[in-house]
Image (cartoon, rainbow, N blue to C red):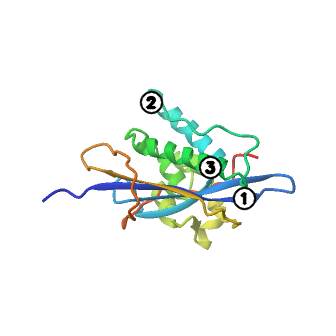
C-alpha cells in the first residue's frame, strides 16, 4: 500500500473594504488553508487578514529565522483600490505565494505565532503575548476555540476578533499543495476540491494600511 499523500490547499480570496473611521478605510482578505497534514491542528479554517498583518507576520518570522531568506510580500501601494481588479488580483496572488513558501519551510512552521496568525482569531498584540505564554489561554486553546474566522461569544471579549462584514468582489485565487509525508511540501496548481482541509487563520484589526 502506498502511504497517504499529504496536501495543503491555500487560498487567498474575497477582498472586503472596511471603514476604520470617517476618513480611513482598509481592505482585508479571507485566507483558507485546507490540509490533511499532521502539522496543523485544524482540518479546515478561514480567517480574514489585511496587508499590514502580513507585514507584521513577516517581521516576526524574520526574527526567528535569521539564516532563512524569507519570501517577499507584494509591494505596498499608496494608491491601492478595491475597484482596480488588476491591483486586487496581483496583491492576492502575492500574499498567497508568500504563504506557500512559508508553509514550504519546515523551520518556519515551528513558530507558534505563525499558527496563531493562521488558525486563531487573536489580534496581533495578543498573538505575541500568547506565544510568550502571557495569556490565560494556551496556543492550542486559542486555535481550538476559533471557528471559521469568528470566536464564540465567550471568547470575543478576550480575543479581539474582527468579524466586520462588507461587500465582496468575489475574486479569489487557489493553489493545491500535495506533498509526501516524508518530504518537504511541493506546491502544484490544481482545480480539484480537497475534502480534508486545515487553515491556520486569524483576523486582526491592529496594524494600519490605507
Label 3: how many residues lie within 10 Å, few (<14), some (14-19) or many (20+)? many
- Tell me if label 3 and label 2 are in contact, CB under 8 Å: no
**Could you give the CA–CA distance between mark 1 and mark 3, rounded to whole angstroms?**
20 Å
Residue labelled with disc 3: 124
Label 1: how many residues lie within 10 Å, few (<14), some (14-19) or many (20+)? some
* Furthest-left residue in this view: 1
Numbered disc 2: secondary structure? loop
The circle on residue 17 is: 1
Q: Which one is earlier in the sequence, the residue at label 3 or at label 2? A: 2
Nearer to us of marks 1 and 3 is 1
Asked whether the viewer can see residue 34, the reply is yes
Image quadrant in which you'd find residue 44: bottom left
Looking at the rendered image, the quarter that the N terminus falls into is bottom left
Which residue is found at the position 45% from the left and 42% from the top? 102
* Furthest-right residue in this view: 22
Image quadrant in which you'd find residue 191: bottom left
Nearer to us of marks 3 and 2 is 2
Residue labelled with disc 2: 68
**Could you give the CA–CA distance between mark 1 and mark 2, rounded to whole angstroms?**
34 Å
Q: Is residue 80 left or right of residue 143?
A: right
Q: Is residue 47 left or right of residue 37?
A: right
**Could you give the CA–CA distance between mark 3 and mark 2, rounded to whole angstroms?**
23 Å
> Between 78 and 162, which is closer to the camera in this rendering?
78
* Furthest-bottom residue in this view: 153
The circle on residue 86 is: none
Numbered disc 3: secondary structure? helix
Which residue is found at the position 66% from the left and 53% from the top? 85
Q: Position of residue 186 (x, y in %)?
A: 34, 45
Numbered disc 1: secondary structure? strand
Q: Position of residue 15 (x, y in %)?
A: 64, 58
Q: Position of residue 169 (x, y in %)?
A: 66, 62
Amino acid at each position: 500500500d502506498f502511504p497517504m499523500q499529504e496536501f495543503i490547499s491555500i487560498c487567498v480570496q474575497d477582498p472586503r473594504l472596511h471603514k476604520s473611521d470617517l476618513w480611513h478605510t482598509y481592505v482585508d482578505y479571507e485566507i483558507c488553508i485546507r490540509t490533511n497534514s499532521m502539522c496543523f491542528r485544524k482540518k479546515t479554517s478561514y480567517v480574514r487578514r489585511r496587508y499590514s498583518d502580513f507585514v507584521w507576520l513577516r517581521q516576526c518570522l524574520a526574527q526567528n529565522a535569521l539564516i532563512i531568506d524569507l519570501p517577499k510580500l507584494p509591494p505596498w501601494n499608496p494608491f491601492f483600490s478595491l475597484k482596480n481588479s488588476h491591483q486586487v488580483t496581483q496583491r492576492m496572488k502575492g500574499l498567497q505565494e508568500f504563504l506557500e513558501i512559508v508553509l514550504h519551510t519546515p523551520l518556519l512552521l515551528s513558530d507558534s505565532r505563525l499558527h496563531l496568525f493562521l488558525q486563531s482569531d487573536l489580534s496581533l498584540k495578543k498573538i505575541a503575548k500568547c506565544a510568550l505564554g502571557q495569556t490565560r489561554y494556551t496556543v492550542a486553546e486559542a486555535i481550538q476555540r476559533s471557528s471559521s474566522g469568528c470566536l464564540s461569544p465567550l471568547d470575543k471579549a478576550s480575543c479581539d476578533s474582527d468579524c466586520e462584514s462588507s461587500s465582496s468582489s468575489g475574486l479569489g485565487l487557489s493553489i493545491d499543495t500535495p506533498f509526501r509525508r516524508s518530504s518537504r511540501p511541493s506546491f502544484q496548481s490544481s482545480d480539484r476540491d480537497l475534502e480534508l482541509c486545515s487553515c491556520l487563520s486569524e483576523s486582526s484589526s491592529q496594524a494600519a494600511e490605507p
